[in-house]
Image: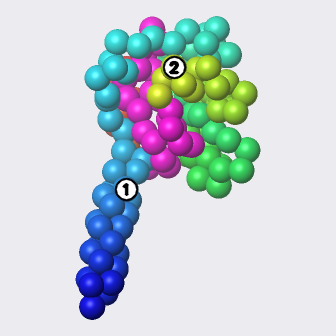
Amino acid sequence: MTGLVVCAVVLAAASVYGLWQRHNGGRLKVRGRDAQRRLGAAEIGADLGQRATLVQFSSAFCQPCRATRRTLAEVADMVDGVTHVEIDAEERLALVRELGILKTPTVLVLDAGGSIVSRASGQPRRADVIAALGQAV
């Protein structure tokens, strides 16, 4: 009987954690340490956009990274002065560690000066990306 109770508690805890992850995954938000961080063209390996830059950290076998790439490219094409830069996380481990990126895809929204406006871990929704660009511009 004790084993059954332990099993039920573990399943309940795992379900709550899964729902929490699903709810928060892909949400664009500002973390305290990101608010003061700037990235330049040398760090991201491409020129910054005139108005904003969407930086995506990806890995080779990441399925959500492909969908995120399409979403960010579409948004960058829709909004003038916005560029999309994709960085292979495996090739840029020092930058990944410095920025505290724990999973792919991770998206950073930078303003024209390279300051991090918001960040999303997981696949963001198009509407959320557009709203974050509104804060950056």
Q: Quadrant of the N terminus?
A: bottom left
Any mark on residue 40, and which? none
- Image coordinates of residue 53 in percent, x first then y, are 52, 23
Q: Is residue 111 left or right of residue 7?
A: right
| Magenta-colored stretch includes residue 107 | yes
Circles 1 and 2 in contact, beta carbons < 8 Å: no
- Tell me which corner region of the image, top left, top right, bottom left or bottom right, holds residue 56: top right
Residue at image point 31% right, 29% down: 30
The secondary structure type at the circle numbered 2 is helix
For badge 2, the amino acid type reads Glu
The magenta segment: 101-126
- Determine which of the numbered discs, if any, sits on residue 98 in the image: 2
Q: SS class of the residue under badge 1?
A: helix
Nearest the viewer among 118 and 89 is: 89
Amino acid type, residue under disc 1 in the picture: Gln
Q: Nearer the viewer, residue 71 or 4?
A: 4
Decide: is 90 above or below 123: above
Residue 74 in sight in this render: no
Q: Nearer the viewer, residue 35 or 113?
A: 35
Question: Residue at left 70%, top 33%?
Answer: 90
Residue at the image position 45 percent from the left and 42 percent from the top: 121
**In this image, 120 relative to 59: left or right?**
left
Taking the magenta stretch, the answer to whether it contains residue 89 is no
Compared with 18, 99 (above or below) is: above
Q: Earlier in the sequence, mark 1 or mark 2?
A: 1
**Residue drawn at 59 percent across, 53 percent down:** 64
Residue 137 position, x and y percent, is: 37, 20
Disc 1 target residue:
21
Kindly report the distance in space between the C-alpha atoms of the residues bearing marks 1 and 2: 23 Å
Q: Find residue 62 and report its horizontal and vertical position in percent.
A: 65, 50
Q: Residues within 10 Å of mark 1 (few under 14, many from 20)?
A: few
User: Percent from the top left, x then y, of residue 79?
Assistant: 49, 30
